[in-house]
Each structure stands twice: as C-alpha cells, then as structure tokens.
Image (cartoon, helix red, strand yellow):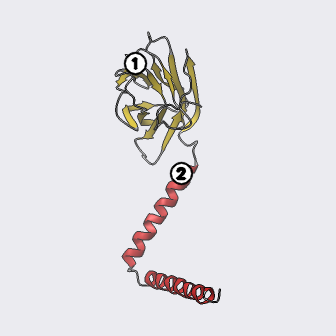
Amino acid sequence: MKWLKPILSLFFLVFVMSVMIGFKHVEFLSAQEKSIIEYYKEEWERREERKAESSYIMSHTKVNTVGTWSASTNAFGYSGANYQPNAKGTGEDTFTWAFKVKRSDQYQVFVHQVPAFDRASNAPFTVTHAQGEDTITVDQRSGNEWFELGTYSFDKDKEWKITLSDAGDGYVIADALKLVSVSDPDWDVVLENDR
C-alpha cells in the first residue's frame, strides 16, 4: 500500500494543474468569445425558466373517451406512461383531448406516433379551432415521433378539442399531442393520453 500514496498525490497534482490551466484559458478568452458564452448561458437559463412554468400555455386540460381505449405498452417509442389503442370501428368510439390556452395565438399541432403494421393508414383526427373544424387522416403504420396535423388558431379561455375516432382501416392509437406557439416557439406543451 506504500505505492498508493504517491499515486494519489500524483493524481491530485494533475487534477489541480488541469483546473488551473482551465481557469487560465477562461482568463484569455476574447471579449467576443466571452460575449457569446454569456449569450448562450442567458438563453439557456431563460428557456429553463420558461419550461419550468409548465402552465403558461394551458389553463386546463382533460381527456374524454367513448368506447374502449385500454392502456398499452406493447409497442416501443410511446410518449409518457403508455398509449391507448382502439380497433377498427364505425367512428362511434372517440378519444378527445380538451384544453384551454392562456393566450390567443396560432399553434402548431403535432400527434405522437407509435407505428406498427396493424395500425390504421387513415386514423382521423378532428381539430376544433377558431376558424371551424378540420379532419386530418394520419397513416399510423409508419413514421416516427411527432407528425404535424397543421397550424390552427385557438382563442384564450375557450375549450378546444382534438378528437381521434376509431373510423380507420386498422387500430387507431391515442398517444400524445403537442402544441407549439407560432409567435414564440420556445413555448410548447405535450398533452399525454393519460391526463
């Protein structure tokens, strides 16, 4: 064990020298380099503060279901704790995300995909927005992550809905939605299927 003390001392010395060299390097940064570092530091802190305010966009969210939408984790890549499938049907079974926004704005709306061979090629998502209602069909057999349904206007303090029905040609999957503010893309919120 006599050999351990000199080795630890050597490691300590190398550590101290590395720290000193690191500080010395920071001292010799140009004003422009320091300005760039400070800008990104402040930008990161601003984003973290805004993300911490998770209720900024939403004042109210809930999920309503009609029919059988059992929780599943069979396929990988879902958002949150699980996703909820429903077999091909007539459109009577629905999964609805209801929400209110805190400021009137346009929002990009995305749906999270959990692709598999038995999914619908035409899963119908109906978006109720300030200009009316649009139905977008999504191929849930392929693709990954977030699929954009479109950009829509939502007025504050009014309940808005995005509904998925079982009127597809295979299993339809309710996983998660994401809304991104067009006027300030740093602000986004994910609406999970299990709220």
**Vertical side of 40 occupied by 34: above or below:** below
Kindly give the residue lying farthest to the right in the view shown. 1
Q: Nearer the viewer, residue 148 or 155?
A: 148
Circle 2 crowding by C-alpha within 10 Å: few under 14, some 14–19, many from 20? some
Q: For the residue marked with disc 1, what is the amino acid?
A: Gly
Q: Nearer the viewer, residue 122 or 43?
A: 122
Residue 58 placement: quadrant: top right
Which residue occupies 40% across, 31% down? Answer: 115
Q: Secondary structure at mark 2?
A: helix
Marks 2 and 1 sit apart, C-alpha to C-alpha, by: 39 Å
Residue 182 screen position, x and y as percent: 40, 41
**Vertical side of 79 occupied by 62: above or below:** above
Q: Quadrant of the C terminus?
A: top right
Q: Quadrant of the N terminus?
A: bottom right
Residue 69 screen position, x and y as percent: 54, 21
Residue 24 screen position, x and y as percent: 46, 85
Circle 1 crowding by C-alpha within 10 Å: few under 14, some 14–19, many from 20? many
Q: For the residue marked with disc 2, what is the amino acid?
A: Arg
Q: Which mark is residue 159?
A: none
Which residue occupies 37% across, 75% down? Answer: 32
Q: Secondary structure at mark 1?
A: loop
**Vertical side of 76 occupied by 32: above or below:** below
Location of mark 2 (residue): 50
Location of mark 1 (residue): 170
Which residue occupies 55% across, 84% down? Answer: 11
Residue 102 placement: quadrant: top right
Residue 95 screen position, x and y as percent: 51, 21
**Vertical side of 133 occupied by 151: above or below:** below
